[in-house]
Amino acid sequence: MTLEDWYRQDRLPHIYCAGCGNGTILNCTLRAVNELGLVQDRTTFVSGIGCSSRAAGYTSSDSLHTTHGRALPFATGVKLVKPENDVIVFTGDGDLSAIGGNHFIHACRRNIDLTVICMNNNIYGMTGGQGSPCTPYGAITTTTPYGMHEMPFDLCAVAEAAGANYVARWTSFHVKELTEAIRTGIETPGLSFIEVMAQCPTSFGSKNKMKQVSQMIDMFRTNAVLKGKAERDRAAGIPLAPGKFIVGELVRRSNPVLGGRP
Amino acid sequence: MTDKTEFLNGNTACAEGAIAAGCRFFAGYPITPSTEVAERMAARLPKVGGTFIQMEDELASMAAIIGGAWAGARTMTATSGPGFSLMMENIGYAAMTETPCVVVNVQRGGPSTGQPTMAAQGDMIQARFGSHGDYSIIALAPSSVQEMFDLTVKAFDLADRFRTPVFLMADETIGHMREKVILRGDVEIIPRRELGSDELPCKPDANGVPGFGTFGNGHGVHITGLTHDERGYPATDSAALHENLVRRQVGKIENFRNEIADVDIVNPDAEVIFISYGAPTRAVQQLLADYPGVYGHFNLRIVWPFPDAKLAEFRAAKAFVVPEMNLGQIAREVRMHTNVPVVTAPKLGGALHSVDELKHAADVAATATGTFTEVLL
Amino acid sequence: MKLVIDERRCKGCNLCTQVCPYRIFQEGKRPGPRGYVIPVLDHPERCTNCRLQIMYGRQLCGMCQMTCPDQAISWIEEKPYEAHKVVIEY
């Protein structure tokens, strides 16, 4: 089993726009899966609706591309019937936190043994760039033409509060760290939530003064604050600057798990 | 396993039927008047190696049983009208992805929250046409506690044979009524046809049903609610492919509507024929006992797909009377398949039809001339 | 080993030009077969993975391959093996 075998080769190239971060996240996921030596027949990818959720269709193992927001309950069904399977969920910020918000909270509360990879591109990409619950305050989208006037979700904080066993945040720029986080997430029993900030140059960057992919990558590089530094800053009384976000492994614990390996 | 005779309510008998049929995964959400199904499953499933989970809502329940079905189990959920409405999204998904699963709908008065503790049959059209797009499903209607058991078993077999969601359209009366029920110990389970190793996951066999690529069996299938080709890959821009797919999925059920028909045909030479399903069947049976040989009776245990050819067996029919606990939902379907006058005898609010009311409807029907008449009870 | 860009997959986003520590990938000038402007390789023999994978027996660096959203970057076997002169710039 090589890395290439995890891709459904006859479906590539995929439908993502040039420079989309989702392809990178797919790479990191499959690399982590391959490094862990997971068995293809015992691995299931589940996804909802949106750009992120097309990723499941580019993996060569069994994959379930479901309805909008419902990937987690579908995955719950798969996992409870086949607890020996590794079930990995691809989802996006709109899919997971808007229409699927309730399912997200309850999957974390149950601490069911899934790995949830959220490709957070701050926007609804597939429908053409509408504002999502993760759109930063003030950002321009097609449904917030005068700037987003609602506060965004902190998905990792939600996952932590709801009870997930493993929570991490990285960006599509931090490929090595992301791969490592996905590896750890798959290995950790219970719900592992990995939020990945992904660039959407087509719908988000173009409206928010980041017309080039490189500008979005630079934004991730400059705005990502490592967890250790953020904690030191907080201890020193320095608040997180606006627009910055914390990356790193945010939670790792061993609360009781639903649907763990028999 | 030997048969067991018990005195149970319909919902409990339904859960026992599911266990007997090999259902090993149940995801549900509490709702009156279906909750006893979930309660019984919660108590029984862990003892037979199955899994029960109470989900956060009916959307999730329906999603979970579809996921569970793809992982290889026979799966079921139970709900009532408001929950059924929430499930519609994923019922369409199950139809498009051809996922076998069983949904029990113990109907109550609607629309909206309506009458939680009263019987109705108001979801019959929703069961057939509730989700968006063109598809077909199978819906069964039990009229006794024994049928709650038997038809639940049958629902699983039909779901696996046709790879479709199957609805058990019970109502509050049947769900909460207690009767003697024989829990059969000899239920034969016909497994799904597994996808062959050289078969494409969405290529149908001669009956229009593809093999089932259970997750974990090495098929590497991709399942999507998008219009897909025979490999299961999204192919949303071809009109011909979409039409073929939808027509095939509808046809695989509708073409067998008369073959799988589960009906009682009583007094086929009568002139006034009652057509009923579910709880009103019991009132019609009483009427036929009180007036022997006068009326005909067409009792449907499978309502959808509607067995239209069976109607022709009532050769002398001068009128069809359709007593329903809704405003004539199946009466309209009957009207589509006959030129004989159709009399709809609706009753809302939860009270069952009385024999006198049915007699009155029959008297109206005997002189009915219009193609579609409503009789007020 | 030899570094290659699959022209049937590359969409010309130029992310590889940003992440390669050796700046092997340079923005291209001419459109490829699908109309995308494919990056060009500047002295790809400088790539660590090309040079040292055989010696270490595992993939080294790999930033470009992991980052490439279009799965267009890979290494292929070179046969027969050609010795490359490596220019190290200080």
Image (spheres, rainbow, N blue to C red):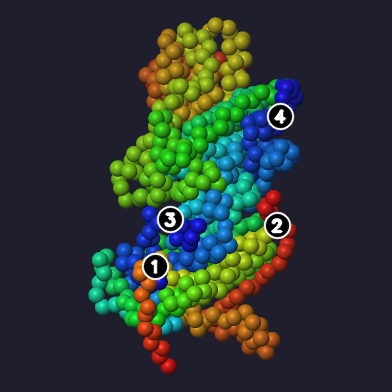
Q: Measure the C-alpha gap from mark 2 to mark 4.
A: 35 Å
Q: On the picture, is B214 further left or further right than A8?
A: right
Q: Do tags 1 and 3 sit on the same chain?
A: no
Q: Measure the C-alpha gap from mark 2 to mark 3.
A: 32 Å
Q: Position of residue B230 (x, y in %)?
A: 38, 43
Q: Position of residue B158 (x, y in %)?
A: 53, 30
The residue labelled by disc 4 is B9
Q: Residue at x 44, y 42 (%)?
A: B201
The residue labelled by disc 2 is A257
Mark 3: which secondary structure? loop
Q: Position of residue B298 (x, y in %)?
A: 51, 17
Mark 2: which secondary structure? loop
Of badges 4 and 3, the one in the foreground is 3
Q: Quadrant of residue C23?
A: bottom left
Q: Residue at x 64, y 50 (%)?
A: A83
Q: On the picture, is B32 further left or further right than C64?
A: right
Q: What's under tag 4, amino acid-wise? A: Asn
Of badges 1 and 3, the one in the foreground is 1
Q: What's under tag 1, amino acid-wise? A: Glu
Name the subunit of mark 3.
Answer: A
Name the subunit of mark 4.
Answer: B
CB-based contact (under 8 Å), mark 1 and mark 2: no
Q: Do tags 4 and 1 sit on the same chain?
A: no
Q: Measure the C-alpha gap from mark 4 to mark 3.
A: 50 Å
Front-lying residue, C46 or A7 = C46
In this rendering, does residue B108 appear at all?
Answer: no
Q: Do tags 4 and 3 sit on the same chain?
A: no
The residue labelled by disc 1 is C77
Mark 1: which secondary structure? loop
The residue labelled by disc 3 is A8
